[in-house]
Image (tube, grey):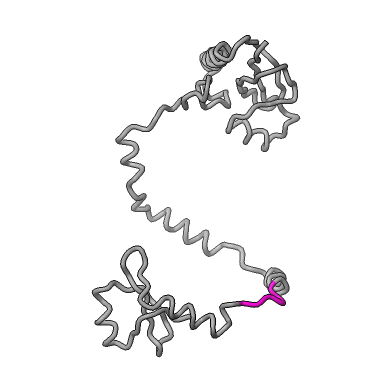
Amino acid sequence: MYGYIYKTVNKNNGMCYIGKKTGMFIPCYRGSGIHLKCALRKYGRQTFTTCAIAWADSKDELNEKEKLYIRLYKELFGAIKMYNIAEGGDGGAIRFGPHTVETRNRMRKPHGPFSEEAKRNVRLAAKTRAPVTSITREKHRKSMEGRENPAKCPEAREKDRIAHLGNQNVRGRVWMHHPELGISSMVKPVEIEQRKFSGWVLGRLF
C-alpha cells in the first residue's frame, strides 16, 4: 500500500476535509489544508474526527483518488460544506481558477474613493482607540532604563544630519528644514531654490 485518502469531519458543523497521505493510516492526523488549519485552531483538534475512506498502491492512483473523492463530496454536499480549496492531486489548482487579465488590472488600481460612511468609521475607530495607560508607560520606561539612546547623542545627530544632506528619496525629493521654525520636510527639486529664499536649508532636522 502506497497511501490512503482520509476524511476529517468537524463534529460541530459537519464540514469536512478530504486529503491524502502516504504510508499507514494515522488516526490523529487531521490534514494540512489552509481552511482546515484555521478551523482546528478555532474549534480545537478534539472537535474533529478522521477516518480512512480509500487506499492506493501508487502515487498516481493516490492523486487520482483524491481528486475523485473531493469532486464527489462537492457534488453530494456542496463546496460550502468543505474545507478544501483545491481540486486535489499534486498541488491541485485552486477551485476559483487563475485571475483573468481584467481582474488583475482591476486589482492593480488603487482602492477608493472611499465613501463618507467608511471615512466616518475610520475616524470613529481612531477616536475610540484605547489610550496608553500609565502602567504601560511605566513598563516601557523601566524597560528602557540603562539603555543608551543614540538619538539623544549629539554626535549621532550630527552624523545623521550630514548623511541626509541632499539625500533624495525614491520620488526624487530632498530633505530640507527651517532652523527657526524647527521643522523638516521633503520637497521637490524644483522647489528647493524657492524654499531657500524663505529661510530653508538642505538637510533633515533631528
Residue ID at (32%, 70%): 173
Count of numbered badges drawn on the protein: 0
Residue ID at (61%, 23%): 17
Please report the bounds of the magenta region as a residue range.
144-149
Residue ID at (32%, 64%): 171
Residue 23 x %, y %: 69, 18
Residue 117 x %, y %: 42, 54
Left or right, 123 with respect to 115, comes to right
Quick one: 68 or 90, which is closer to the camera? Answer: 90
Q: Check residue 145 for magenta coloring.
A: yes
Left or right, 1 with respect to 66, comes to right
Residue 64 versus residue 84 in the image, above or below: above
Residue 197 x %, y %: 26, 87
Residue 91 x %, y %: 52, 25
Residue 98 versus residue 135 in the image, above or below: above
Q: Check residue 15 for magenta coloring.
A: no
Work out which quarter of the rendered image holds the N terminus and state it: top right
